[in-house]
Amino acid sequence: MSAEFLSALRTLLPDDALVTERERLRAFECDALSAYRALPLAVALPTTEAQVTAIVSLAHTHRIPVVARGSGTGLSGGARPVAGGLVLGLSRMSSIIDIDPLARLARVQPGVRNQSISMAAAPYGLYYAPDPSSQIACSIGGNVAENAGGIHCLKYGLTVHNVLGVRAVTVEGDVIQVGGSTLDSPGYDLLALLIGSEGMLAVVTEVTVRLLPKPPQARVVLAAFGSVRTAADAVARVIADGLIPAAMEMMDGATVRAVNAFLDIGYPDDAEAILLIEADGTADEVDADIASIEALMHECGASELRLSHDEAERQRLWAGRKAAFPAAAMLAPDYYCMDGSIPRAKVGEVIEQIAELGREFGLACINVFHAGDGNLHPLILFDANQADELARAERYGTRIAELCLAAGGTITGEHGVGIEKLDAMCSQFNAAELAQFRALKEAFDPDGLLNPGKLIPELHRCAEYGRMHVHHGQLPHPELPRF
């Protein structure tokens, strides 16, 4: 069956658009969660929607699993191949189809890099707001799959708030249009369902995004603190006082020092935590917001305040934050990046509990996160060459997810579930909820061919997970599903 499928696949694509050689396949065996790998049967690299339609239809006929892949920057294993399956690489579908400055919209193919949209819109004074730290590399199709956020999601929202429509190919090879170029469309809100569905319902081939006017001015306050708890309390105070900054990010002291060593960025080395808080808008609006932020930071015990005075200085302050993940690589041979969301008022408490867990597991953990919306990104440091450190890091990560749930939060914010958080899904949702998720999956993909084995755990897995973790207790589920 595989040989017959590959032979038919070769008739659909140019020679350079089909990868079957073992060594070349290794470039696609994982995403940025590189601890988990699998070799696919083949990788198809289409350039048009018609090719995607033909490929997916062929795979459906031959019952071959299909995993859609963008730039491979995902951190949850969502783009890991299925052994014996097909990787549908969309990176060559990288055209910006149209920019409409009057309607403030852009239509793009899924392989377009996030940052490229803003670059193309810049001549019109517009930009695309969601800005993941990987925005120079990550693709808009991947952003749609994971509902990516970024530094400015506090004020401007996640991908789901900035995408108006998608074209997508169903598992049978049919093209559907969901949403469009207006604020609302008739029928069920399938657009919100597809965004964040991790490639399990359809393959996105075109995205219509909302563009925003570039703010006339933006400035950043850097506030240094003597403890993580004090900085976290300052975050809650900002929101409680009615301020909604464009961005509010936090780094602990270990991350600050790693970033300084990596980029020589000049953050205060003696701080145990720093906040980067940005205000944008008209000059008068920014001046008023900055004055309020500075006053609040003083009241909350900031030991040092710095203010960007020009665009170059603002960009420099943000460059350090966006370099936090690569800077972490200087601290250990490997790191495991977690992702969870909690109420802002619980940030300080949960960060302290994460540190306690680190002592229990004998592993260091540094923290950098979207403080304004409580989206944590603990980086667990380990050495995969040591016999049990990866396993300890995984258990540590699962316990962090449970901490987030116990604090009233969720197991993920923007990285998705993929294969990484399948066990944690068993704590987040009860059997009735998981059954509803499976029913949705089956409605779109009854044979389970699109990105199988991701996002939704089977009930037997949850039963086994409960037995394995009974020593620290399963979290209680409400009696009714939460939707």
Image (tube, rainbow, N blue to C red):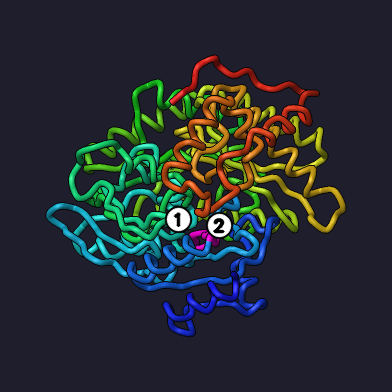
Q: Is residue 142 left or right of residue 75?
A: left
Q: Which residue is mark 1?
A: 142
Q: Which quadrant does the C terminus fall into?
A: top left
Q: Position of residue 50 (x, y in %)?
A: 33, 69
Q: Which amino acid type corresponds to the residue marked 2 in the rendered image?
A: Ala
Seen from the viewer's position, the closer of residues 404 and 63 is 63
Magenta-colored stretch includes residue 377: no
Q: Quadrant of residue 174?
A: bottom left
The label number, if any, that marks residue 79 in the structure image: 2
Q: Position of residue 263 (x, y in %)?
A: 57, 60
- The CA distance from mark 1 to mark 2 is 9 Å
Q: Secondary structure at mark 2?
A: loop
Q: Quadrant of residue 125?
A: bottom left
The label number, if any, that marks residue 417 in the structure image: none
Q: Secondary structure at mark 1?
A: helix
* Residue 327 seen by the camera: yes
Query: Are the residues at dot 1 and dot 2 in contact (C-beta closer than 8 Å)?
Result: yes
Q: Residue furthest bottom?
A: 15
* In the depicted structure, whether residue 56 falls above or below residue 256: below
* In the depicted structure, whether residue 401 falls above or below residue 455: above
